[in-house]
Amino acid sequence: MFERLSRPLFRLVPDNTHIPFMRGRIAGLAFSALLSVASVVLAITPGLEKGIDFKGGITMEVRTPGPADLPTIRTALARLPFGDVGVQQFGDPTTLLLRLPTQGEEAQTQAAVAATRSTIEQVAPGVRILRVEAVGNRVSDELFQGGMIALGLSLLAMMLYIWFRFEWQFGVGAVVTLILEVTKVIGFLAVTRIEFNLTTVAAVLTIVGFSVNDKVVVYDRMRENLRRFKTMPLRELIDRSINETLNRTLGTSMTLLLAALPLALFGGDTLAGFAWCMLFGIVISASSSIFIAAPILLFLGENRLRRGTEAVAAPVKAAPRT
């Protein structure tokens, strides 16, 4: 009984799994590169749905006494001289999100907010203004640049960390994989039209941290096996290392998926973008550790990581008798 309880009761994959992942290394890299190129194209055309953090403007969250009459409210707000005013349902039928373009100076912004408040109160008496957010062009540009700098610095820090902890082949493989992952997440945002704002940037940075942690675990097992199996071909050694850490990789990913899924389904519009971005990033990260990072390491280190092991593996010749 105690012996049974000392063993894991549930395993995602058997302990003696021997899946030849490296057989599909070319297809995996080609498919990943294709998706990343398509993601970059989609990020340019039609582009990302930037939130107020990055494009500037005014956001007003309002709540009506009953279900909102969207056509009437849109018609009334369209008469205002402040540009195209976006109106959408936000969560329940009584809550609306209004978006106005940037109005320039602070006085113009306050005038636009006051006129919008007055107009919607006439259309829907008893309406309540829950929050008002205004971001100017200069501030939005600074926020966008700051977010991109944070993302770039995180990739650089990850490369230096893995480089110093392992060899440069590991660092290059990890950073190239992270860049491919980030571009895919950007493509996901472009396709789903989820707002690209500071919240989604935080989600991308979280994905980068999780992905690096997963790759460090796999790389650490590869380094152990490099020291343990002196004559094993690198391709076979990488397959062995991935299979040995497969339960850990899938278990961690499933745990994060189960934690993020309720946020995506029931967290509301405020957290939905962050949660869906996390869900997609977790799937991409788990698959890239196997099909992207490992093949890149194989190509970079096939003739370098084994340097000096031939002499160890070669039999020692006996000295000639005299």
Image (cartoon, rainbow, N blue to C red):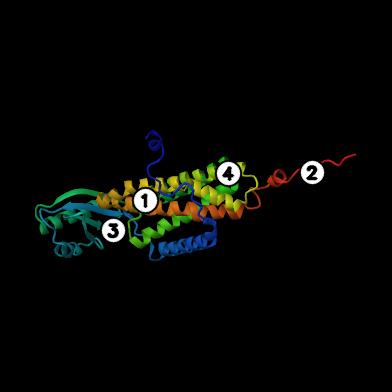
Q: Callout 3: few (<14), some (14-19), or many (20+) C-alpha neighbours within 10 Å?
A: many
Measured as percent of width and height from the top left, residue 121 is found at 12, 55
Q: Which quadrant would the N terminus be assigned to in this image?
A: top left
Q: CA distance from mark 1 to mark 2?
A: 58 Å
Q: Which mark is residue 278?
A: 1
Q: Inspect the image, locate mark 3, and give the three-letter code of the amino acid beneath it.
A: Pro
- Tell which circle, 2 or 3, labels the residue nearer the N-terminal end: 3
Residue closest to the eye, 283 or 321:
321
Measured as percent of width and height from the top left, residue 3 is found at 41, 35
Q: CA distance from mark 4 to mark 1?
A: 32 Å
Q: Which residue is mark 3?
A: 101
Q: Is residue 258 above or below residue 50?
A: above
Determine whether, in the image, residue 297 is placed left or right of residue 200: right
Determine whether, in the image, residue 57 is placed left or right of residue 119: right
Discs 3/4, front: 4
Q: CA distance from mark 3 to mark 1?
A: 29 Å
Discs 4/1, front: 4
Determine whether, in the image, residue 233 is placed left or right of residue 268: right
Do residues under tags 4 and 2 come within 8 Å of each other at their CB atoms? no
Residue drawn 68% across the image and 45% down it: 309
Q: Which residue is mark 2?
A: 317
